[in-house]
Amino acid sequence: DRMLAAIGLDRGKAYIANSDANEVAVISTRDWTVERRISLQASPSSLLLVPELNLLLASNWRDLSVSEIDLARNTVTNTIVLDGRPTYLAYDPSAKHIFVSLEDQGAIAVLDPSLKLVKRIALAASQPTGVAIDANSRRLFVSVRYAVLALDPDSGQELHRVAAPAGVDALE
């Protein structure tokens, strides 16, 4: 099991996915106390904070889903079940798309902010995990088994591939 955090420094909060308890703990970065816990129906594994939408996104690896958490109401407002195991998430502010790596499918799911599936990008690689977007250069980076791919986030076309050691799972 993974326990990952998404930190919103501008809000003085850290959000911690607690997979075993099906919850997200909200921690104050001022005194490191737990302010509240947000219950989920699923088991969160990674989180992505999208401040401009006041949302926290959670990939739920056991349930093959992604959930949207409204931070104003501290509740899950939407969940989409995907046909693969979601690992990491990235948000593209210019296209307003959410990229979700589907590790067991060799693909990236592209969602809109309402979690509607926009498209699926099939990769010529296996075990995609980490995803990161460079909105300025319009590149989506994906860590896969033994490489990091640079994709055009709009077309899904692979632009470059760089060899990487096994175990490169996360991109920041």
Image (cartoon, rainbow, N blue to C red):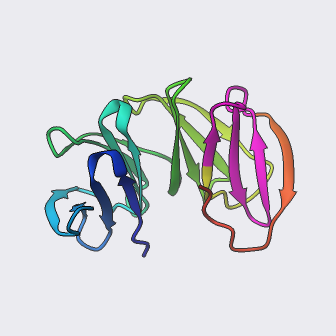
Question: Is 140 within the magenta?
Answer: yes
> Which image quarter is the N terminus in?
bottom left
**47 in relation to 18, above or below:** above
Residue at 70%, 30% in the rendered image? 138
Residue 158 left/right relative to 27:
right
For the residue pair 97 and 66, the one nearer the viewer reads as 97
Q: Where residue 34 appears, x then y in whole percent?
A: 17, 67
Question: Is 142 within the magenta?
Answer: yes
For the residue pair 8 and 41, the one nearer the viewer reads as 8
Residue at 20%, 68% in the rendered image? 31
Direction front: furthest residue: 30
Question: Could you tell me how many numbered marks the image carries?
Answer: 0
Residue 157 left/right relative to 9:
right
Q: Where residue 123 appears, x then y in whole percent?
A: 74, 46
> Which portion, as a residue range, is magenta?
132-156
For the residue pair 22 and 48, the one nearer the viewer reads as 48
Q: Where residue 74 appears, x then y in whole percent?
A: 16, 46
Residue at 71%, 42% in the rendered image? 122
For residue 146, which quarter of the picture? bottom right
Residue at 85%, 56% in the rendered image? 162
> Which image quarter is the C terminus in?
bottom right
**49 in relation to 61, above or below:** above
Direction top: furthest residue: 95
